[in-house]
């Protein structure tokens, strides 16, 4: 089993992420031209982008929304997972041709990643996973690090010209800014039921199914942040796709007042900083 299959086949994984944007045309064009997403559905004030018929990103237009404070709770980055190292190399060469500014490039041991931002400052990671058999685990904790990425070695694996996100690409994880790590762990592990798989300086990572992380949380810019104001640009909602057993177990754990908001297939939740998550049975 490949690492990408580990992410996609986990009991709970990321589905569609929704963002509020002020300039819908510019941001939509960026995700299509630079990231390689394709339009799946369009409507008044909304564009849904993805791969094939799989929607990965929904952009919602609100031209009057205040710009999000980069120190507030909310999105740190969306992480687009590509199936192979060659795919990442081809994307990197494509980004270089477009003269896209990269904020960073890192070897995380479990993955190789490039970082950038969209025109409204929403963080983006584009990465591939090393095979899961090569990940190191100790007492339920996966070993991750932030090391320089060997770009020459990476681009040498490119076998063809970039032609958009390949089939099998998905949002492998979402990394969030939170106000406090202990409260994040109480919510994402205690209530949502994710496994704590890595404690890192200023950050905690959560997953299901033995993946290195589906949700990351950090306080690097947002320590002590209050509930996020609305409306504001940036993250609107993270959809989590859960199998039947995981969905049922989560519903049983919910306090009565939260369970009352659920349907047979959807559980709307908010973390302690107001970040919206919608758990959907699949």
Image (tube, rainbow, N blue to C red):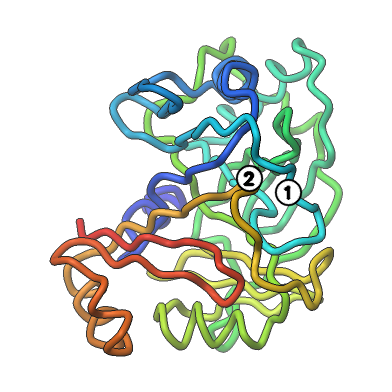
Local SS, label 2? strand
| Residue at image mark 2 | 234
Q: Single out the residue that lies furthest toward the left.
A: 264
- Decide: is 81 above or below 87: below
In x, y percent, where is residue 224? Answer: 79, 78
Picture layout, residue 72 above or below residue 199: above
Q: Is residue 173 left or right of residue 243?
A: right
Q: Which mark is residue 168?
A: none
Side of 135 relative to 45 (left or right) = right
Q: Residue 13's quadrant in the figure?
A: bottom left
Instruction: Tell whether label 1 touches label 2 (CB within 8 Å).
Output: yes
Q: Position of residue 260 (x, y in %)?
A: 23, 78
Which element is circle 1 on? loop
Which comes before the other along the chain, label 2 or label 1? 1
Q: Residues within 10 Å of mark 2 (few under 14, many from 20)?
A: many
Image x and y of residue 197, in percent: 56, 77
Identify the image quadrant of residue 55. top left
Which residue shows up at 43% across the image and 62% down it?
Answer: 277
Residue 16 lies, with reference to residue 255, above or below; the image says: above
Res 101 visible: yes
Quarter assignment of residue 176: bottom right
Q: Residue at x 68, y 70 (%)?
A: 178
Report the front residue among 124 and 144: 124
Query: Residue 222's x, y, as percent?
Result: 79, 67
Mark 1 neighbour density, 10 Å: few (under 14) some (14–19) many (20 or more): many
| Foreground of the two, 158 or 229 | 229
Q: Is residue 34 left or right of residue 129?
A: right
Residue 68's tag is 1
Q: Residue at x 70, y 25 (%)?
A: 92
């Amino acid at each position: 089993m490949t690492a990408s299959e580990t992410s996609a086949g986990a009991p709970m994984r990321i589905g569609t992420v929704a963002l509020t944007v002020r300039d819908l045309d510019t941001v939509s064009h960026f995700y299509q031209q630079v990231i390689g997403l394709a339009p799946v559905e369009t409507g008044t004030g909304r564009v849904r982008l993805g791969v094939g018929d799989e929607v990965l990103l929904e952009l919602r237009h609100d031209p009057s929304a205040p710009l999000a404070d980069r120190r507030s709770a909310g999105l740190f980055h969306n992480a687009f997972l590509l199936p192979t190292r060659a795919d990442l190399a081809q994307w990197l060469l494509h980004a270089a041709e477009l003269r896209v500014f990269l904020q960073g490039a890192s070897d995380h041991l479990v993955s190789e990643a490039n970082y950038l931002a969209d025109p409204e400052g929403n963080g983006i990671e584009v990465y591939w996973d090393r095979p899961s058999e090569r990940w190191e685990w100790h007492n339920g904790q996966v070993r991750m690090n932030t090391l320089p990425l060997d770009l020459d070695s990476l681009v040498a694996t490119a076998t063809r010209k970039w032609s958009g996100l390949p089939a099998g690409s998905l949002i492998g994880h979402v990394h969030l800014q939170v106000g406090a790590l202990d409260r994040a762990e109480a919510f994402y592990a205690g209530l949502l039921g994710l496994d704590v798989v890595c404690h890192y300086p200023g950050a905690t990572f959560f997953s299901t199914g033995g993946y290195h992380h589906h949700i990351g949380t950090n306080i690097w810019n947002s320590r002590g942040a209050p509930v996020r104001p609305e409306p504001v640009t940036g993250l609107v909602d993270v959809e989590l796709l859960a199998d039947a057993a995981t969905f049922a177990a989560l519903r049983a754990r919910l306090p009565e007042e939260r369970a009352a908001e659920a349907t047979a297939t959807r559980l709307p939740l908010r973390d302690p900083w107001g970040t919206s998550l919608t758990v959907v049975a699949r």
